[in-house]
Image (cartoon, grey):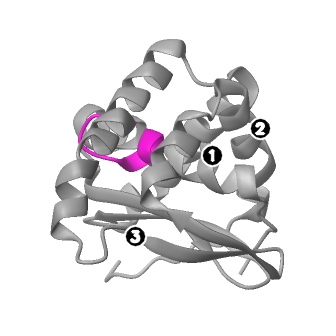
Amino acid sequence: MSCFYLYYKEYYTSIYVDYLLTSGFTSLLMEKLRTEYNLVYSIDSEINVSDYSSYYEINFSTLNKKNAKQCLRLISECLEEIAVNGVKEETYNYTRNKIELGKSKLPTLNKVNAYNKFYTNLIVSGKSIGFLNLETFYDNILKVTRKDIQNFVKNYLNFKNVVIFYTGKN
């Protein structure tokens, strides 16, 4: 598997990228692969951070190998577009609004959470950098700039660093 070291700021950038690419029916890849081309049923992505390395994965479900190949090509084109030209301001702002909506639900989440806080230990490049607090989590994501996104995609989400798994009949 192709892995990379992720630094503190890049962790929040990866989450913004996650929202941008696959969060909901209006995300970039869902719009392209499902709405425009009718190739996938669903698409999802996530960053996986471990003690000494990290990786970003994109998962999608489709009906056949032909669709899968076309999906990979379209995903590659989308990532290349972001790496070269950055994210369009309209797309960046739309994604930002989705993240702000998530932040607006914090009072409800805090009432539900028995501890009134959500913590996870973030280990980056082999050492703990402390705990993420839900109360500041969204603020840190909202600090991500369009240039941060472009650099993240250029440095980490290129097809030279990708491992592809395909499961299915065809």
Extent of the magenta region: 19-27
Can the viewer see residue 157 in this picture?
Answer: no
Q: Disc 2 and disc 3: Cα gap in Å?
A: 29 Å
130 sits left or right of 67 in the view: right
- Give the residue drawn at x 31%, y 66%: 64
85 sits left or right of 39 in the view: right
In percent of width and height, residue 39 lies at 29, 49
The quadrant in which the N terminus is found is bottom right
Can the viewer see residue 139 in this picture?
Answer: yes
Closest to the camera, between mark 2 and mark 3, is: 3
In percent of width and height, residue 44 lies at 37, 60
Mark 2 or mark 3, earlier in chain: 3
Amino acid marked by disc 3: Phe
Point out which mark residue 151 bears.
Answer: 2
- Give the residue drawn at x 46%, y 45%: 138
Point out which mark residue 13 bears.
Answer: 1
Q: Is residue 110 above or below residue 138?
A: below
10 Å crowding of disc 2: few (<14), some (14-19), many (20+): some
Mark 1 or mark 2, earlier in chain: 1
Residue hosting label 3: 118
Q: Is residue 68 above or below residue 170?
A: above
Q: Secondary structure at mark 2?
A: helix
Q: Secondary structure at mark 1?
A: helix
112 sits left or right of 170 in the view: left
Q: Disc 1 and disc 2: Cα gap in Å?
A: 9 Å
